[in-house]
Amino acid sequence: SNQILDLEQDPKAPIHLHITGGNVYGTVRDNAGVTVQVASTGTYNDGQWHHAAVVRTGSDNGPVSVELFVDGSSQGVASNNIATTAVTVNPVEIGRRFTGSAASRYFNGSLDEVIIFNRTLTPAEINASMNNSKYRLYRNFTNLNTGLYKYNIYAMDSAGNLNITSIRNLSITTLFDS
């Protein structure tokens, strides 16, 4: 399997996101072998970019639910009781899985914008995250009247530093053929 994310630092139950045979899987498991897993309803080995999210909810040493989202659509929810006290703590692995003393199950593909949240996201937040960069640099202002428009451009880097351009001018002139 192609391991996308192996988050075993979660002392409550490790979270795994992987793809096998084109199906995406969201899994939570404990050291006793108890597994909660959801598989995608379709295959995603088509050479296109896809957004995948796995959400874990539940209580310590009790019922845990896993919901898998692919391209903003829920692929299903699975639940089971997980013993959260017996989990081995291993490093967070992105693009591979740590097993024993060596890394294995490398992801064969490209990953972009991997984010790990410290809380459960709602389906609306998952969709917002998926679409946050879709039209980031595209703005279409239609039906502008003839005139002078002033604007600034804002950009924020990954460290949170905000940059703002000086005021820029845009002149709109309407010309008609006679």
Image (tube, rainbow, N blue to C red):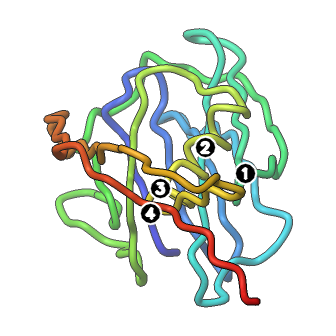
Expressed as whole percent of the image width and height from the top left, the position of residue 50 reads 61, 69
Q: How many marks?
A: 4
Q: Earlier in the sequence, mark 1 or mark 4?
A: 4
Residue 55 vertical placement versus 175 (above, below): above
In the rendered view of the protein, which quadrant contains the C terminus? bottom right
Between the C-alphas of marks 2 and 3, the distance is: 24 Å
Lateral position of residue 94 relative to residue 165, left or right: right
Q: Which residue is mark 4?
A: 4
Q: Identify the amino acid type marked 3.
A: Arg
Of the image marks 1 and 2, the number of the one nearer the N terminus? 2
Write the residue at 69% across / 39% down. 36
Q: Which mark is residue 72?
A: 1
**Alpha carbon separation for disc pair 3 and 1:** 18 Å
Tell me which amino acid carries mark 2. Answer: Val
Task: Name the foreground residue: 48 vs 8.
Answer: 48
Which residue is disc 3 drawn over? 136
Q: CA distance from mark 4 to mark 2?
A: 11 Å
Secondary element under disc 1, as helix, strand or loop, is: loop
Residue depicted at 39% across the width and 69% down the height: 111
- Looking at the image, which residue is at 32% across and 58% down? 94
Which sits earlier in the primary sequence, circle 3 or circle 1?
Answer: 1
Pick whichever of labels 4 and 2 is earlier in the sequence. 4
Closer to us: mark 3 or mark 1?
Answer: 3
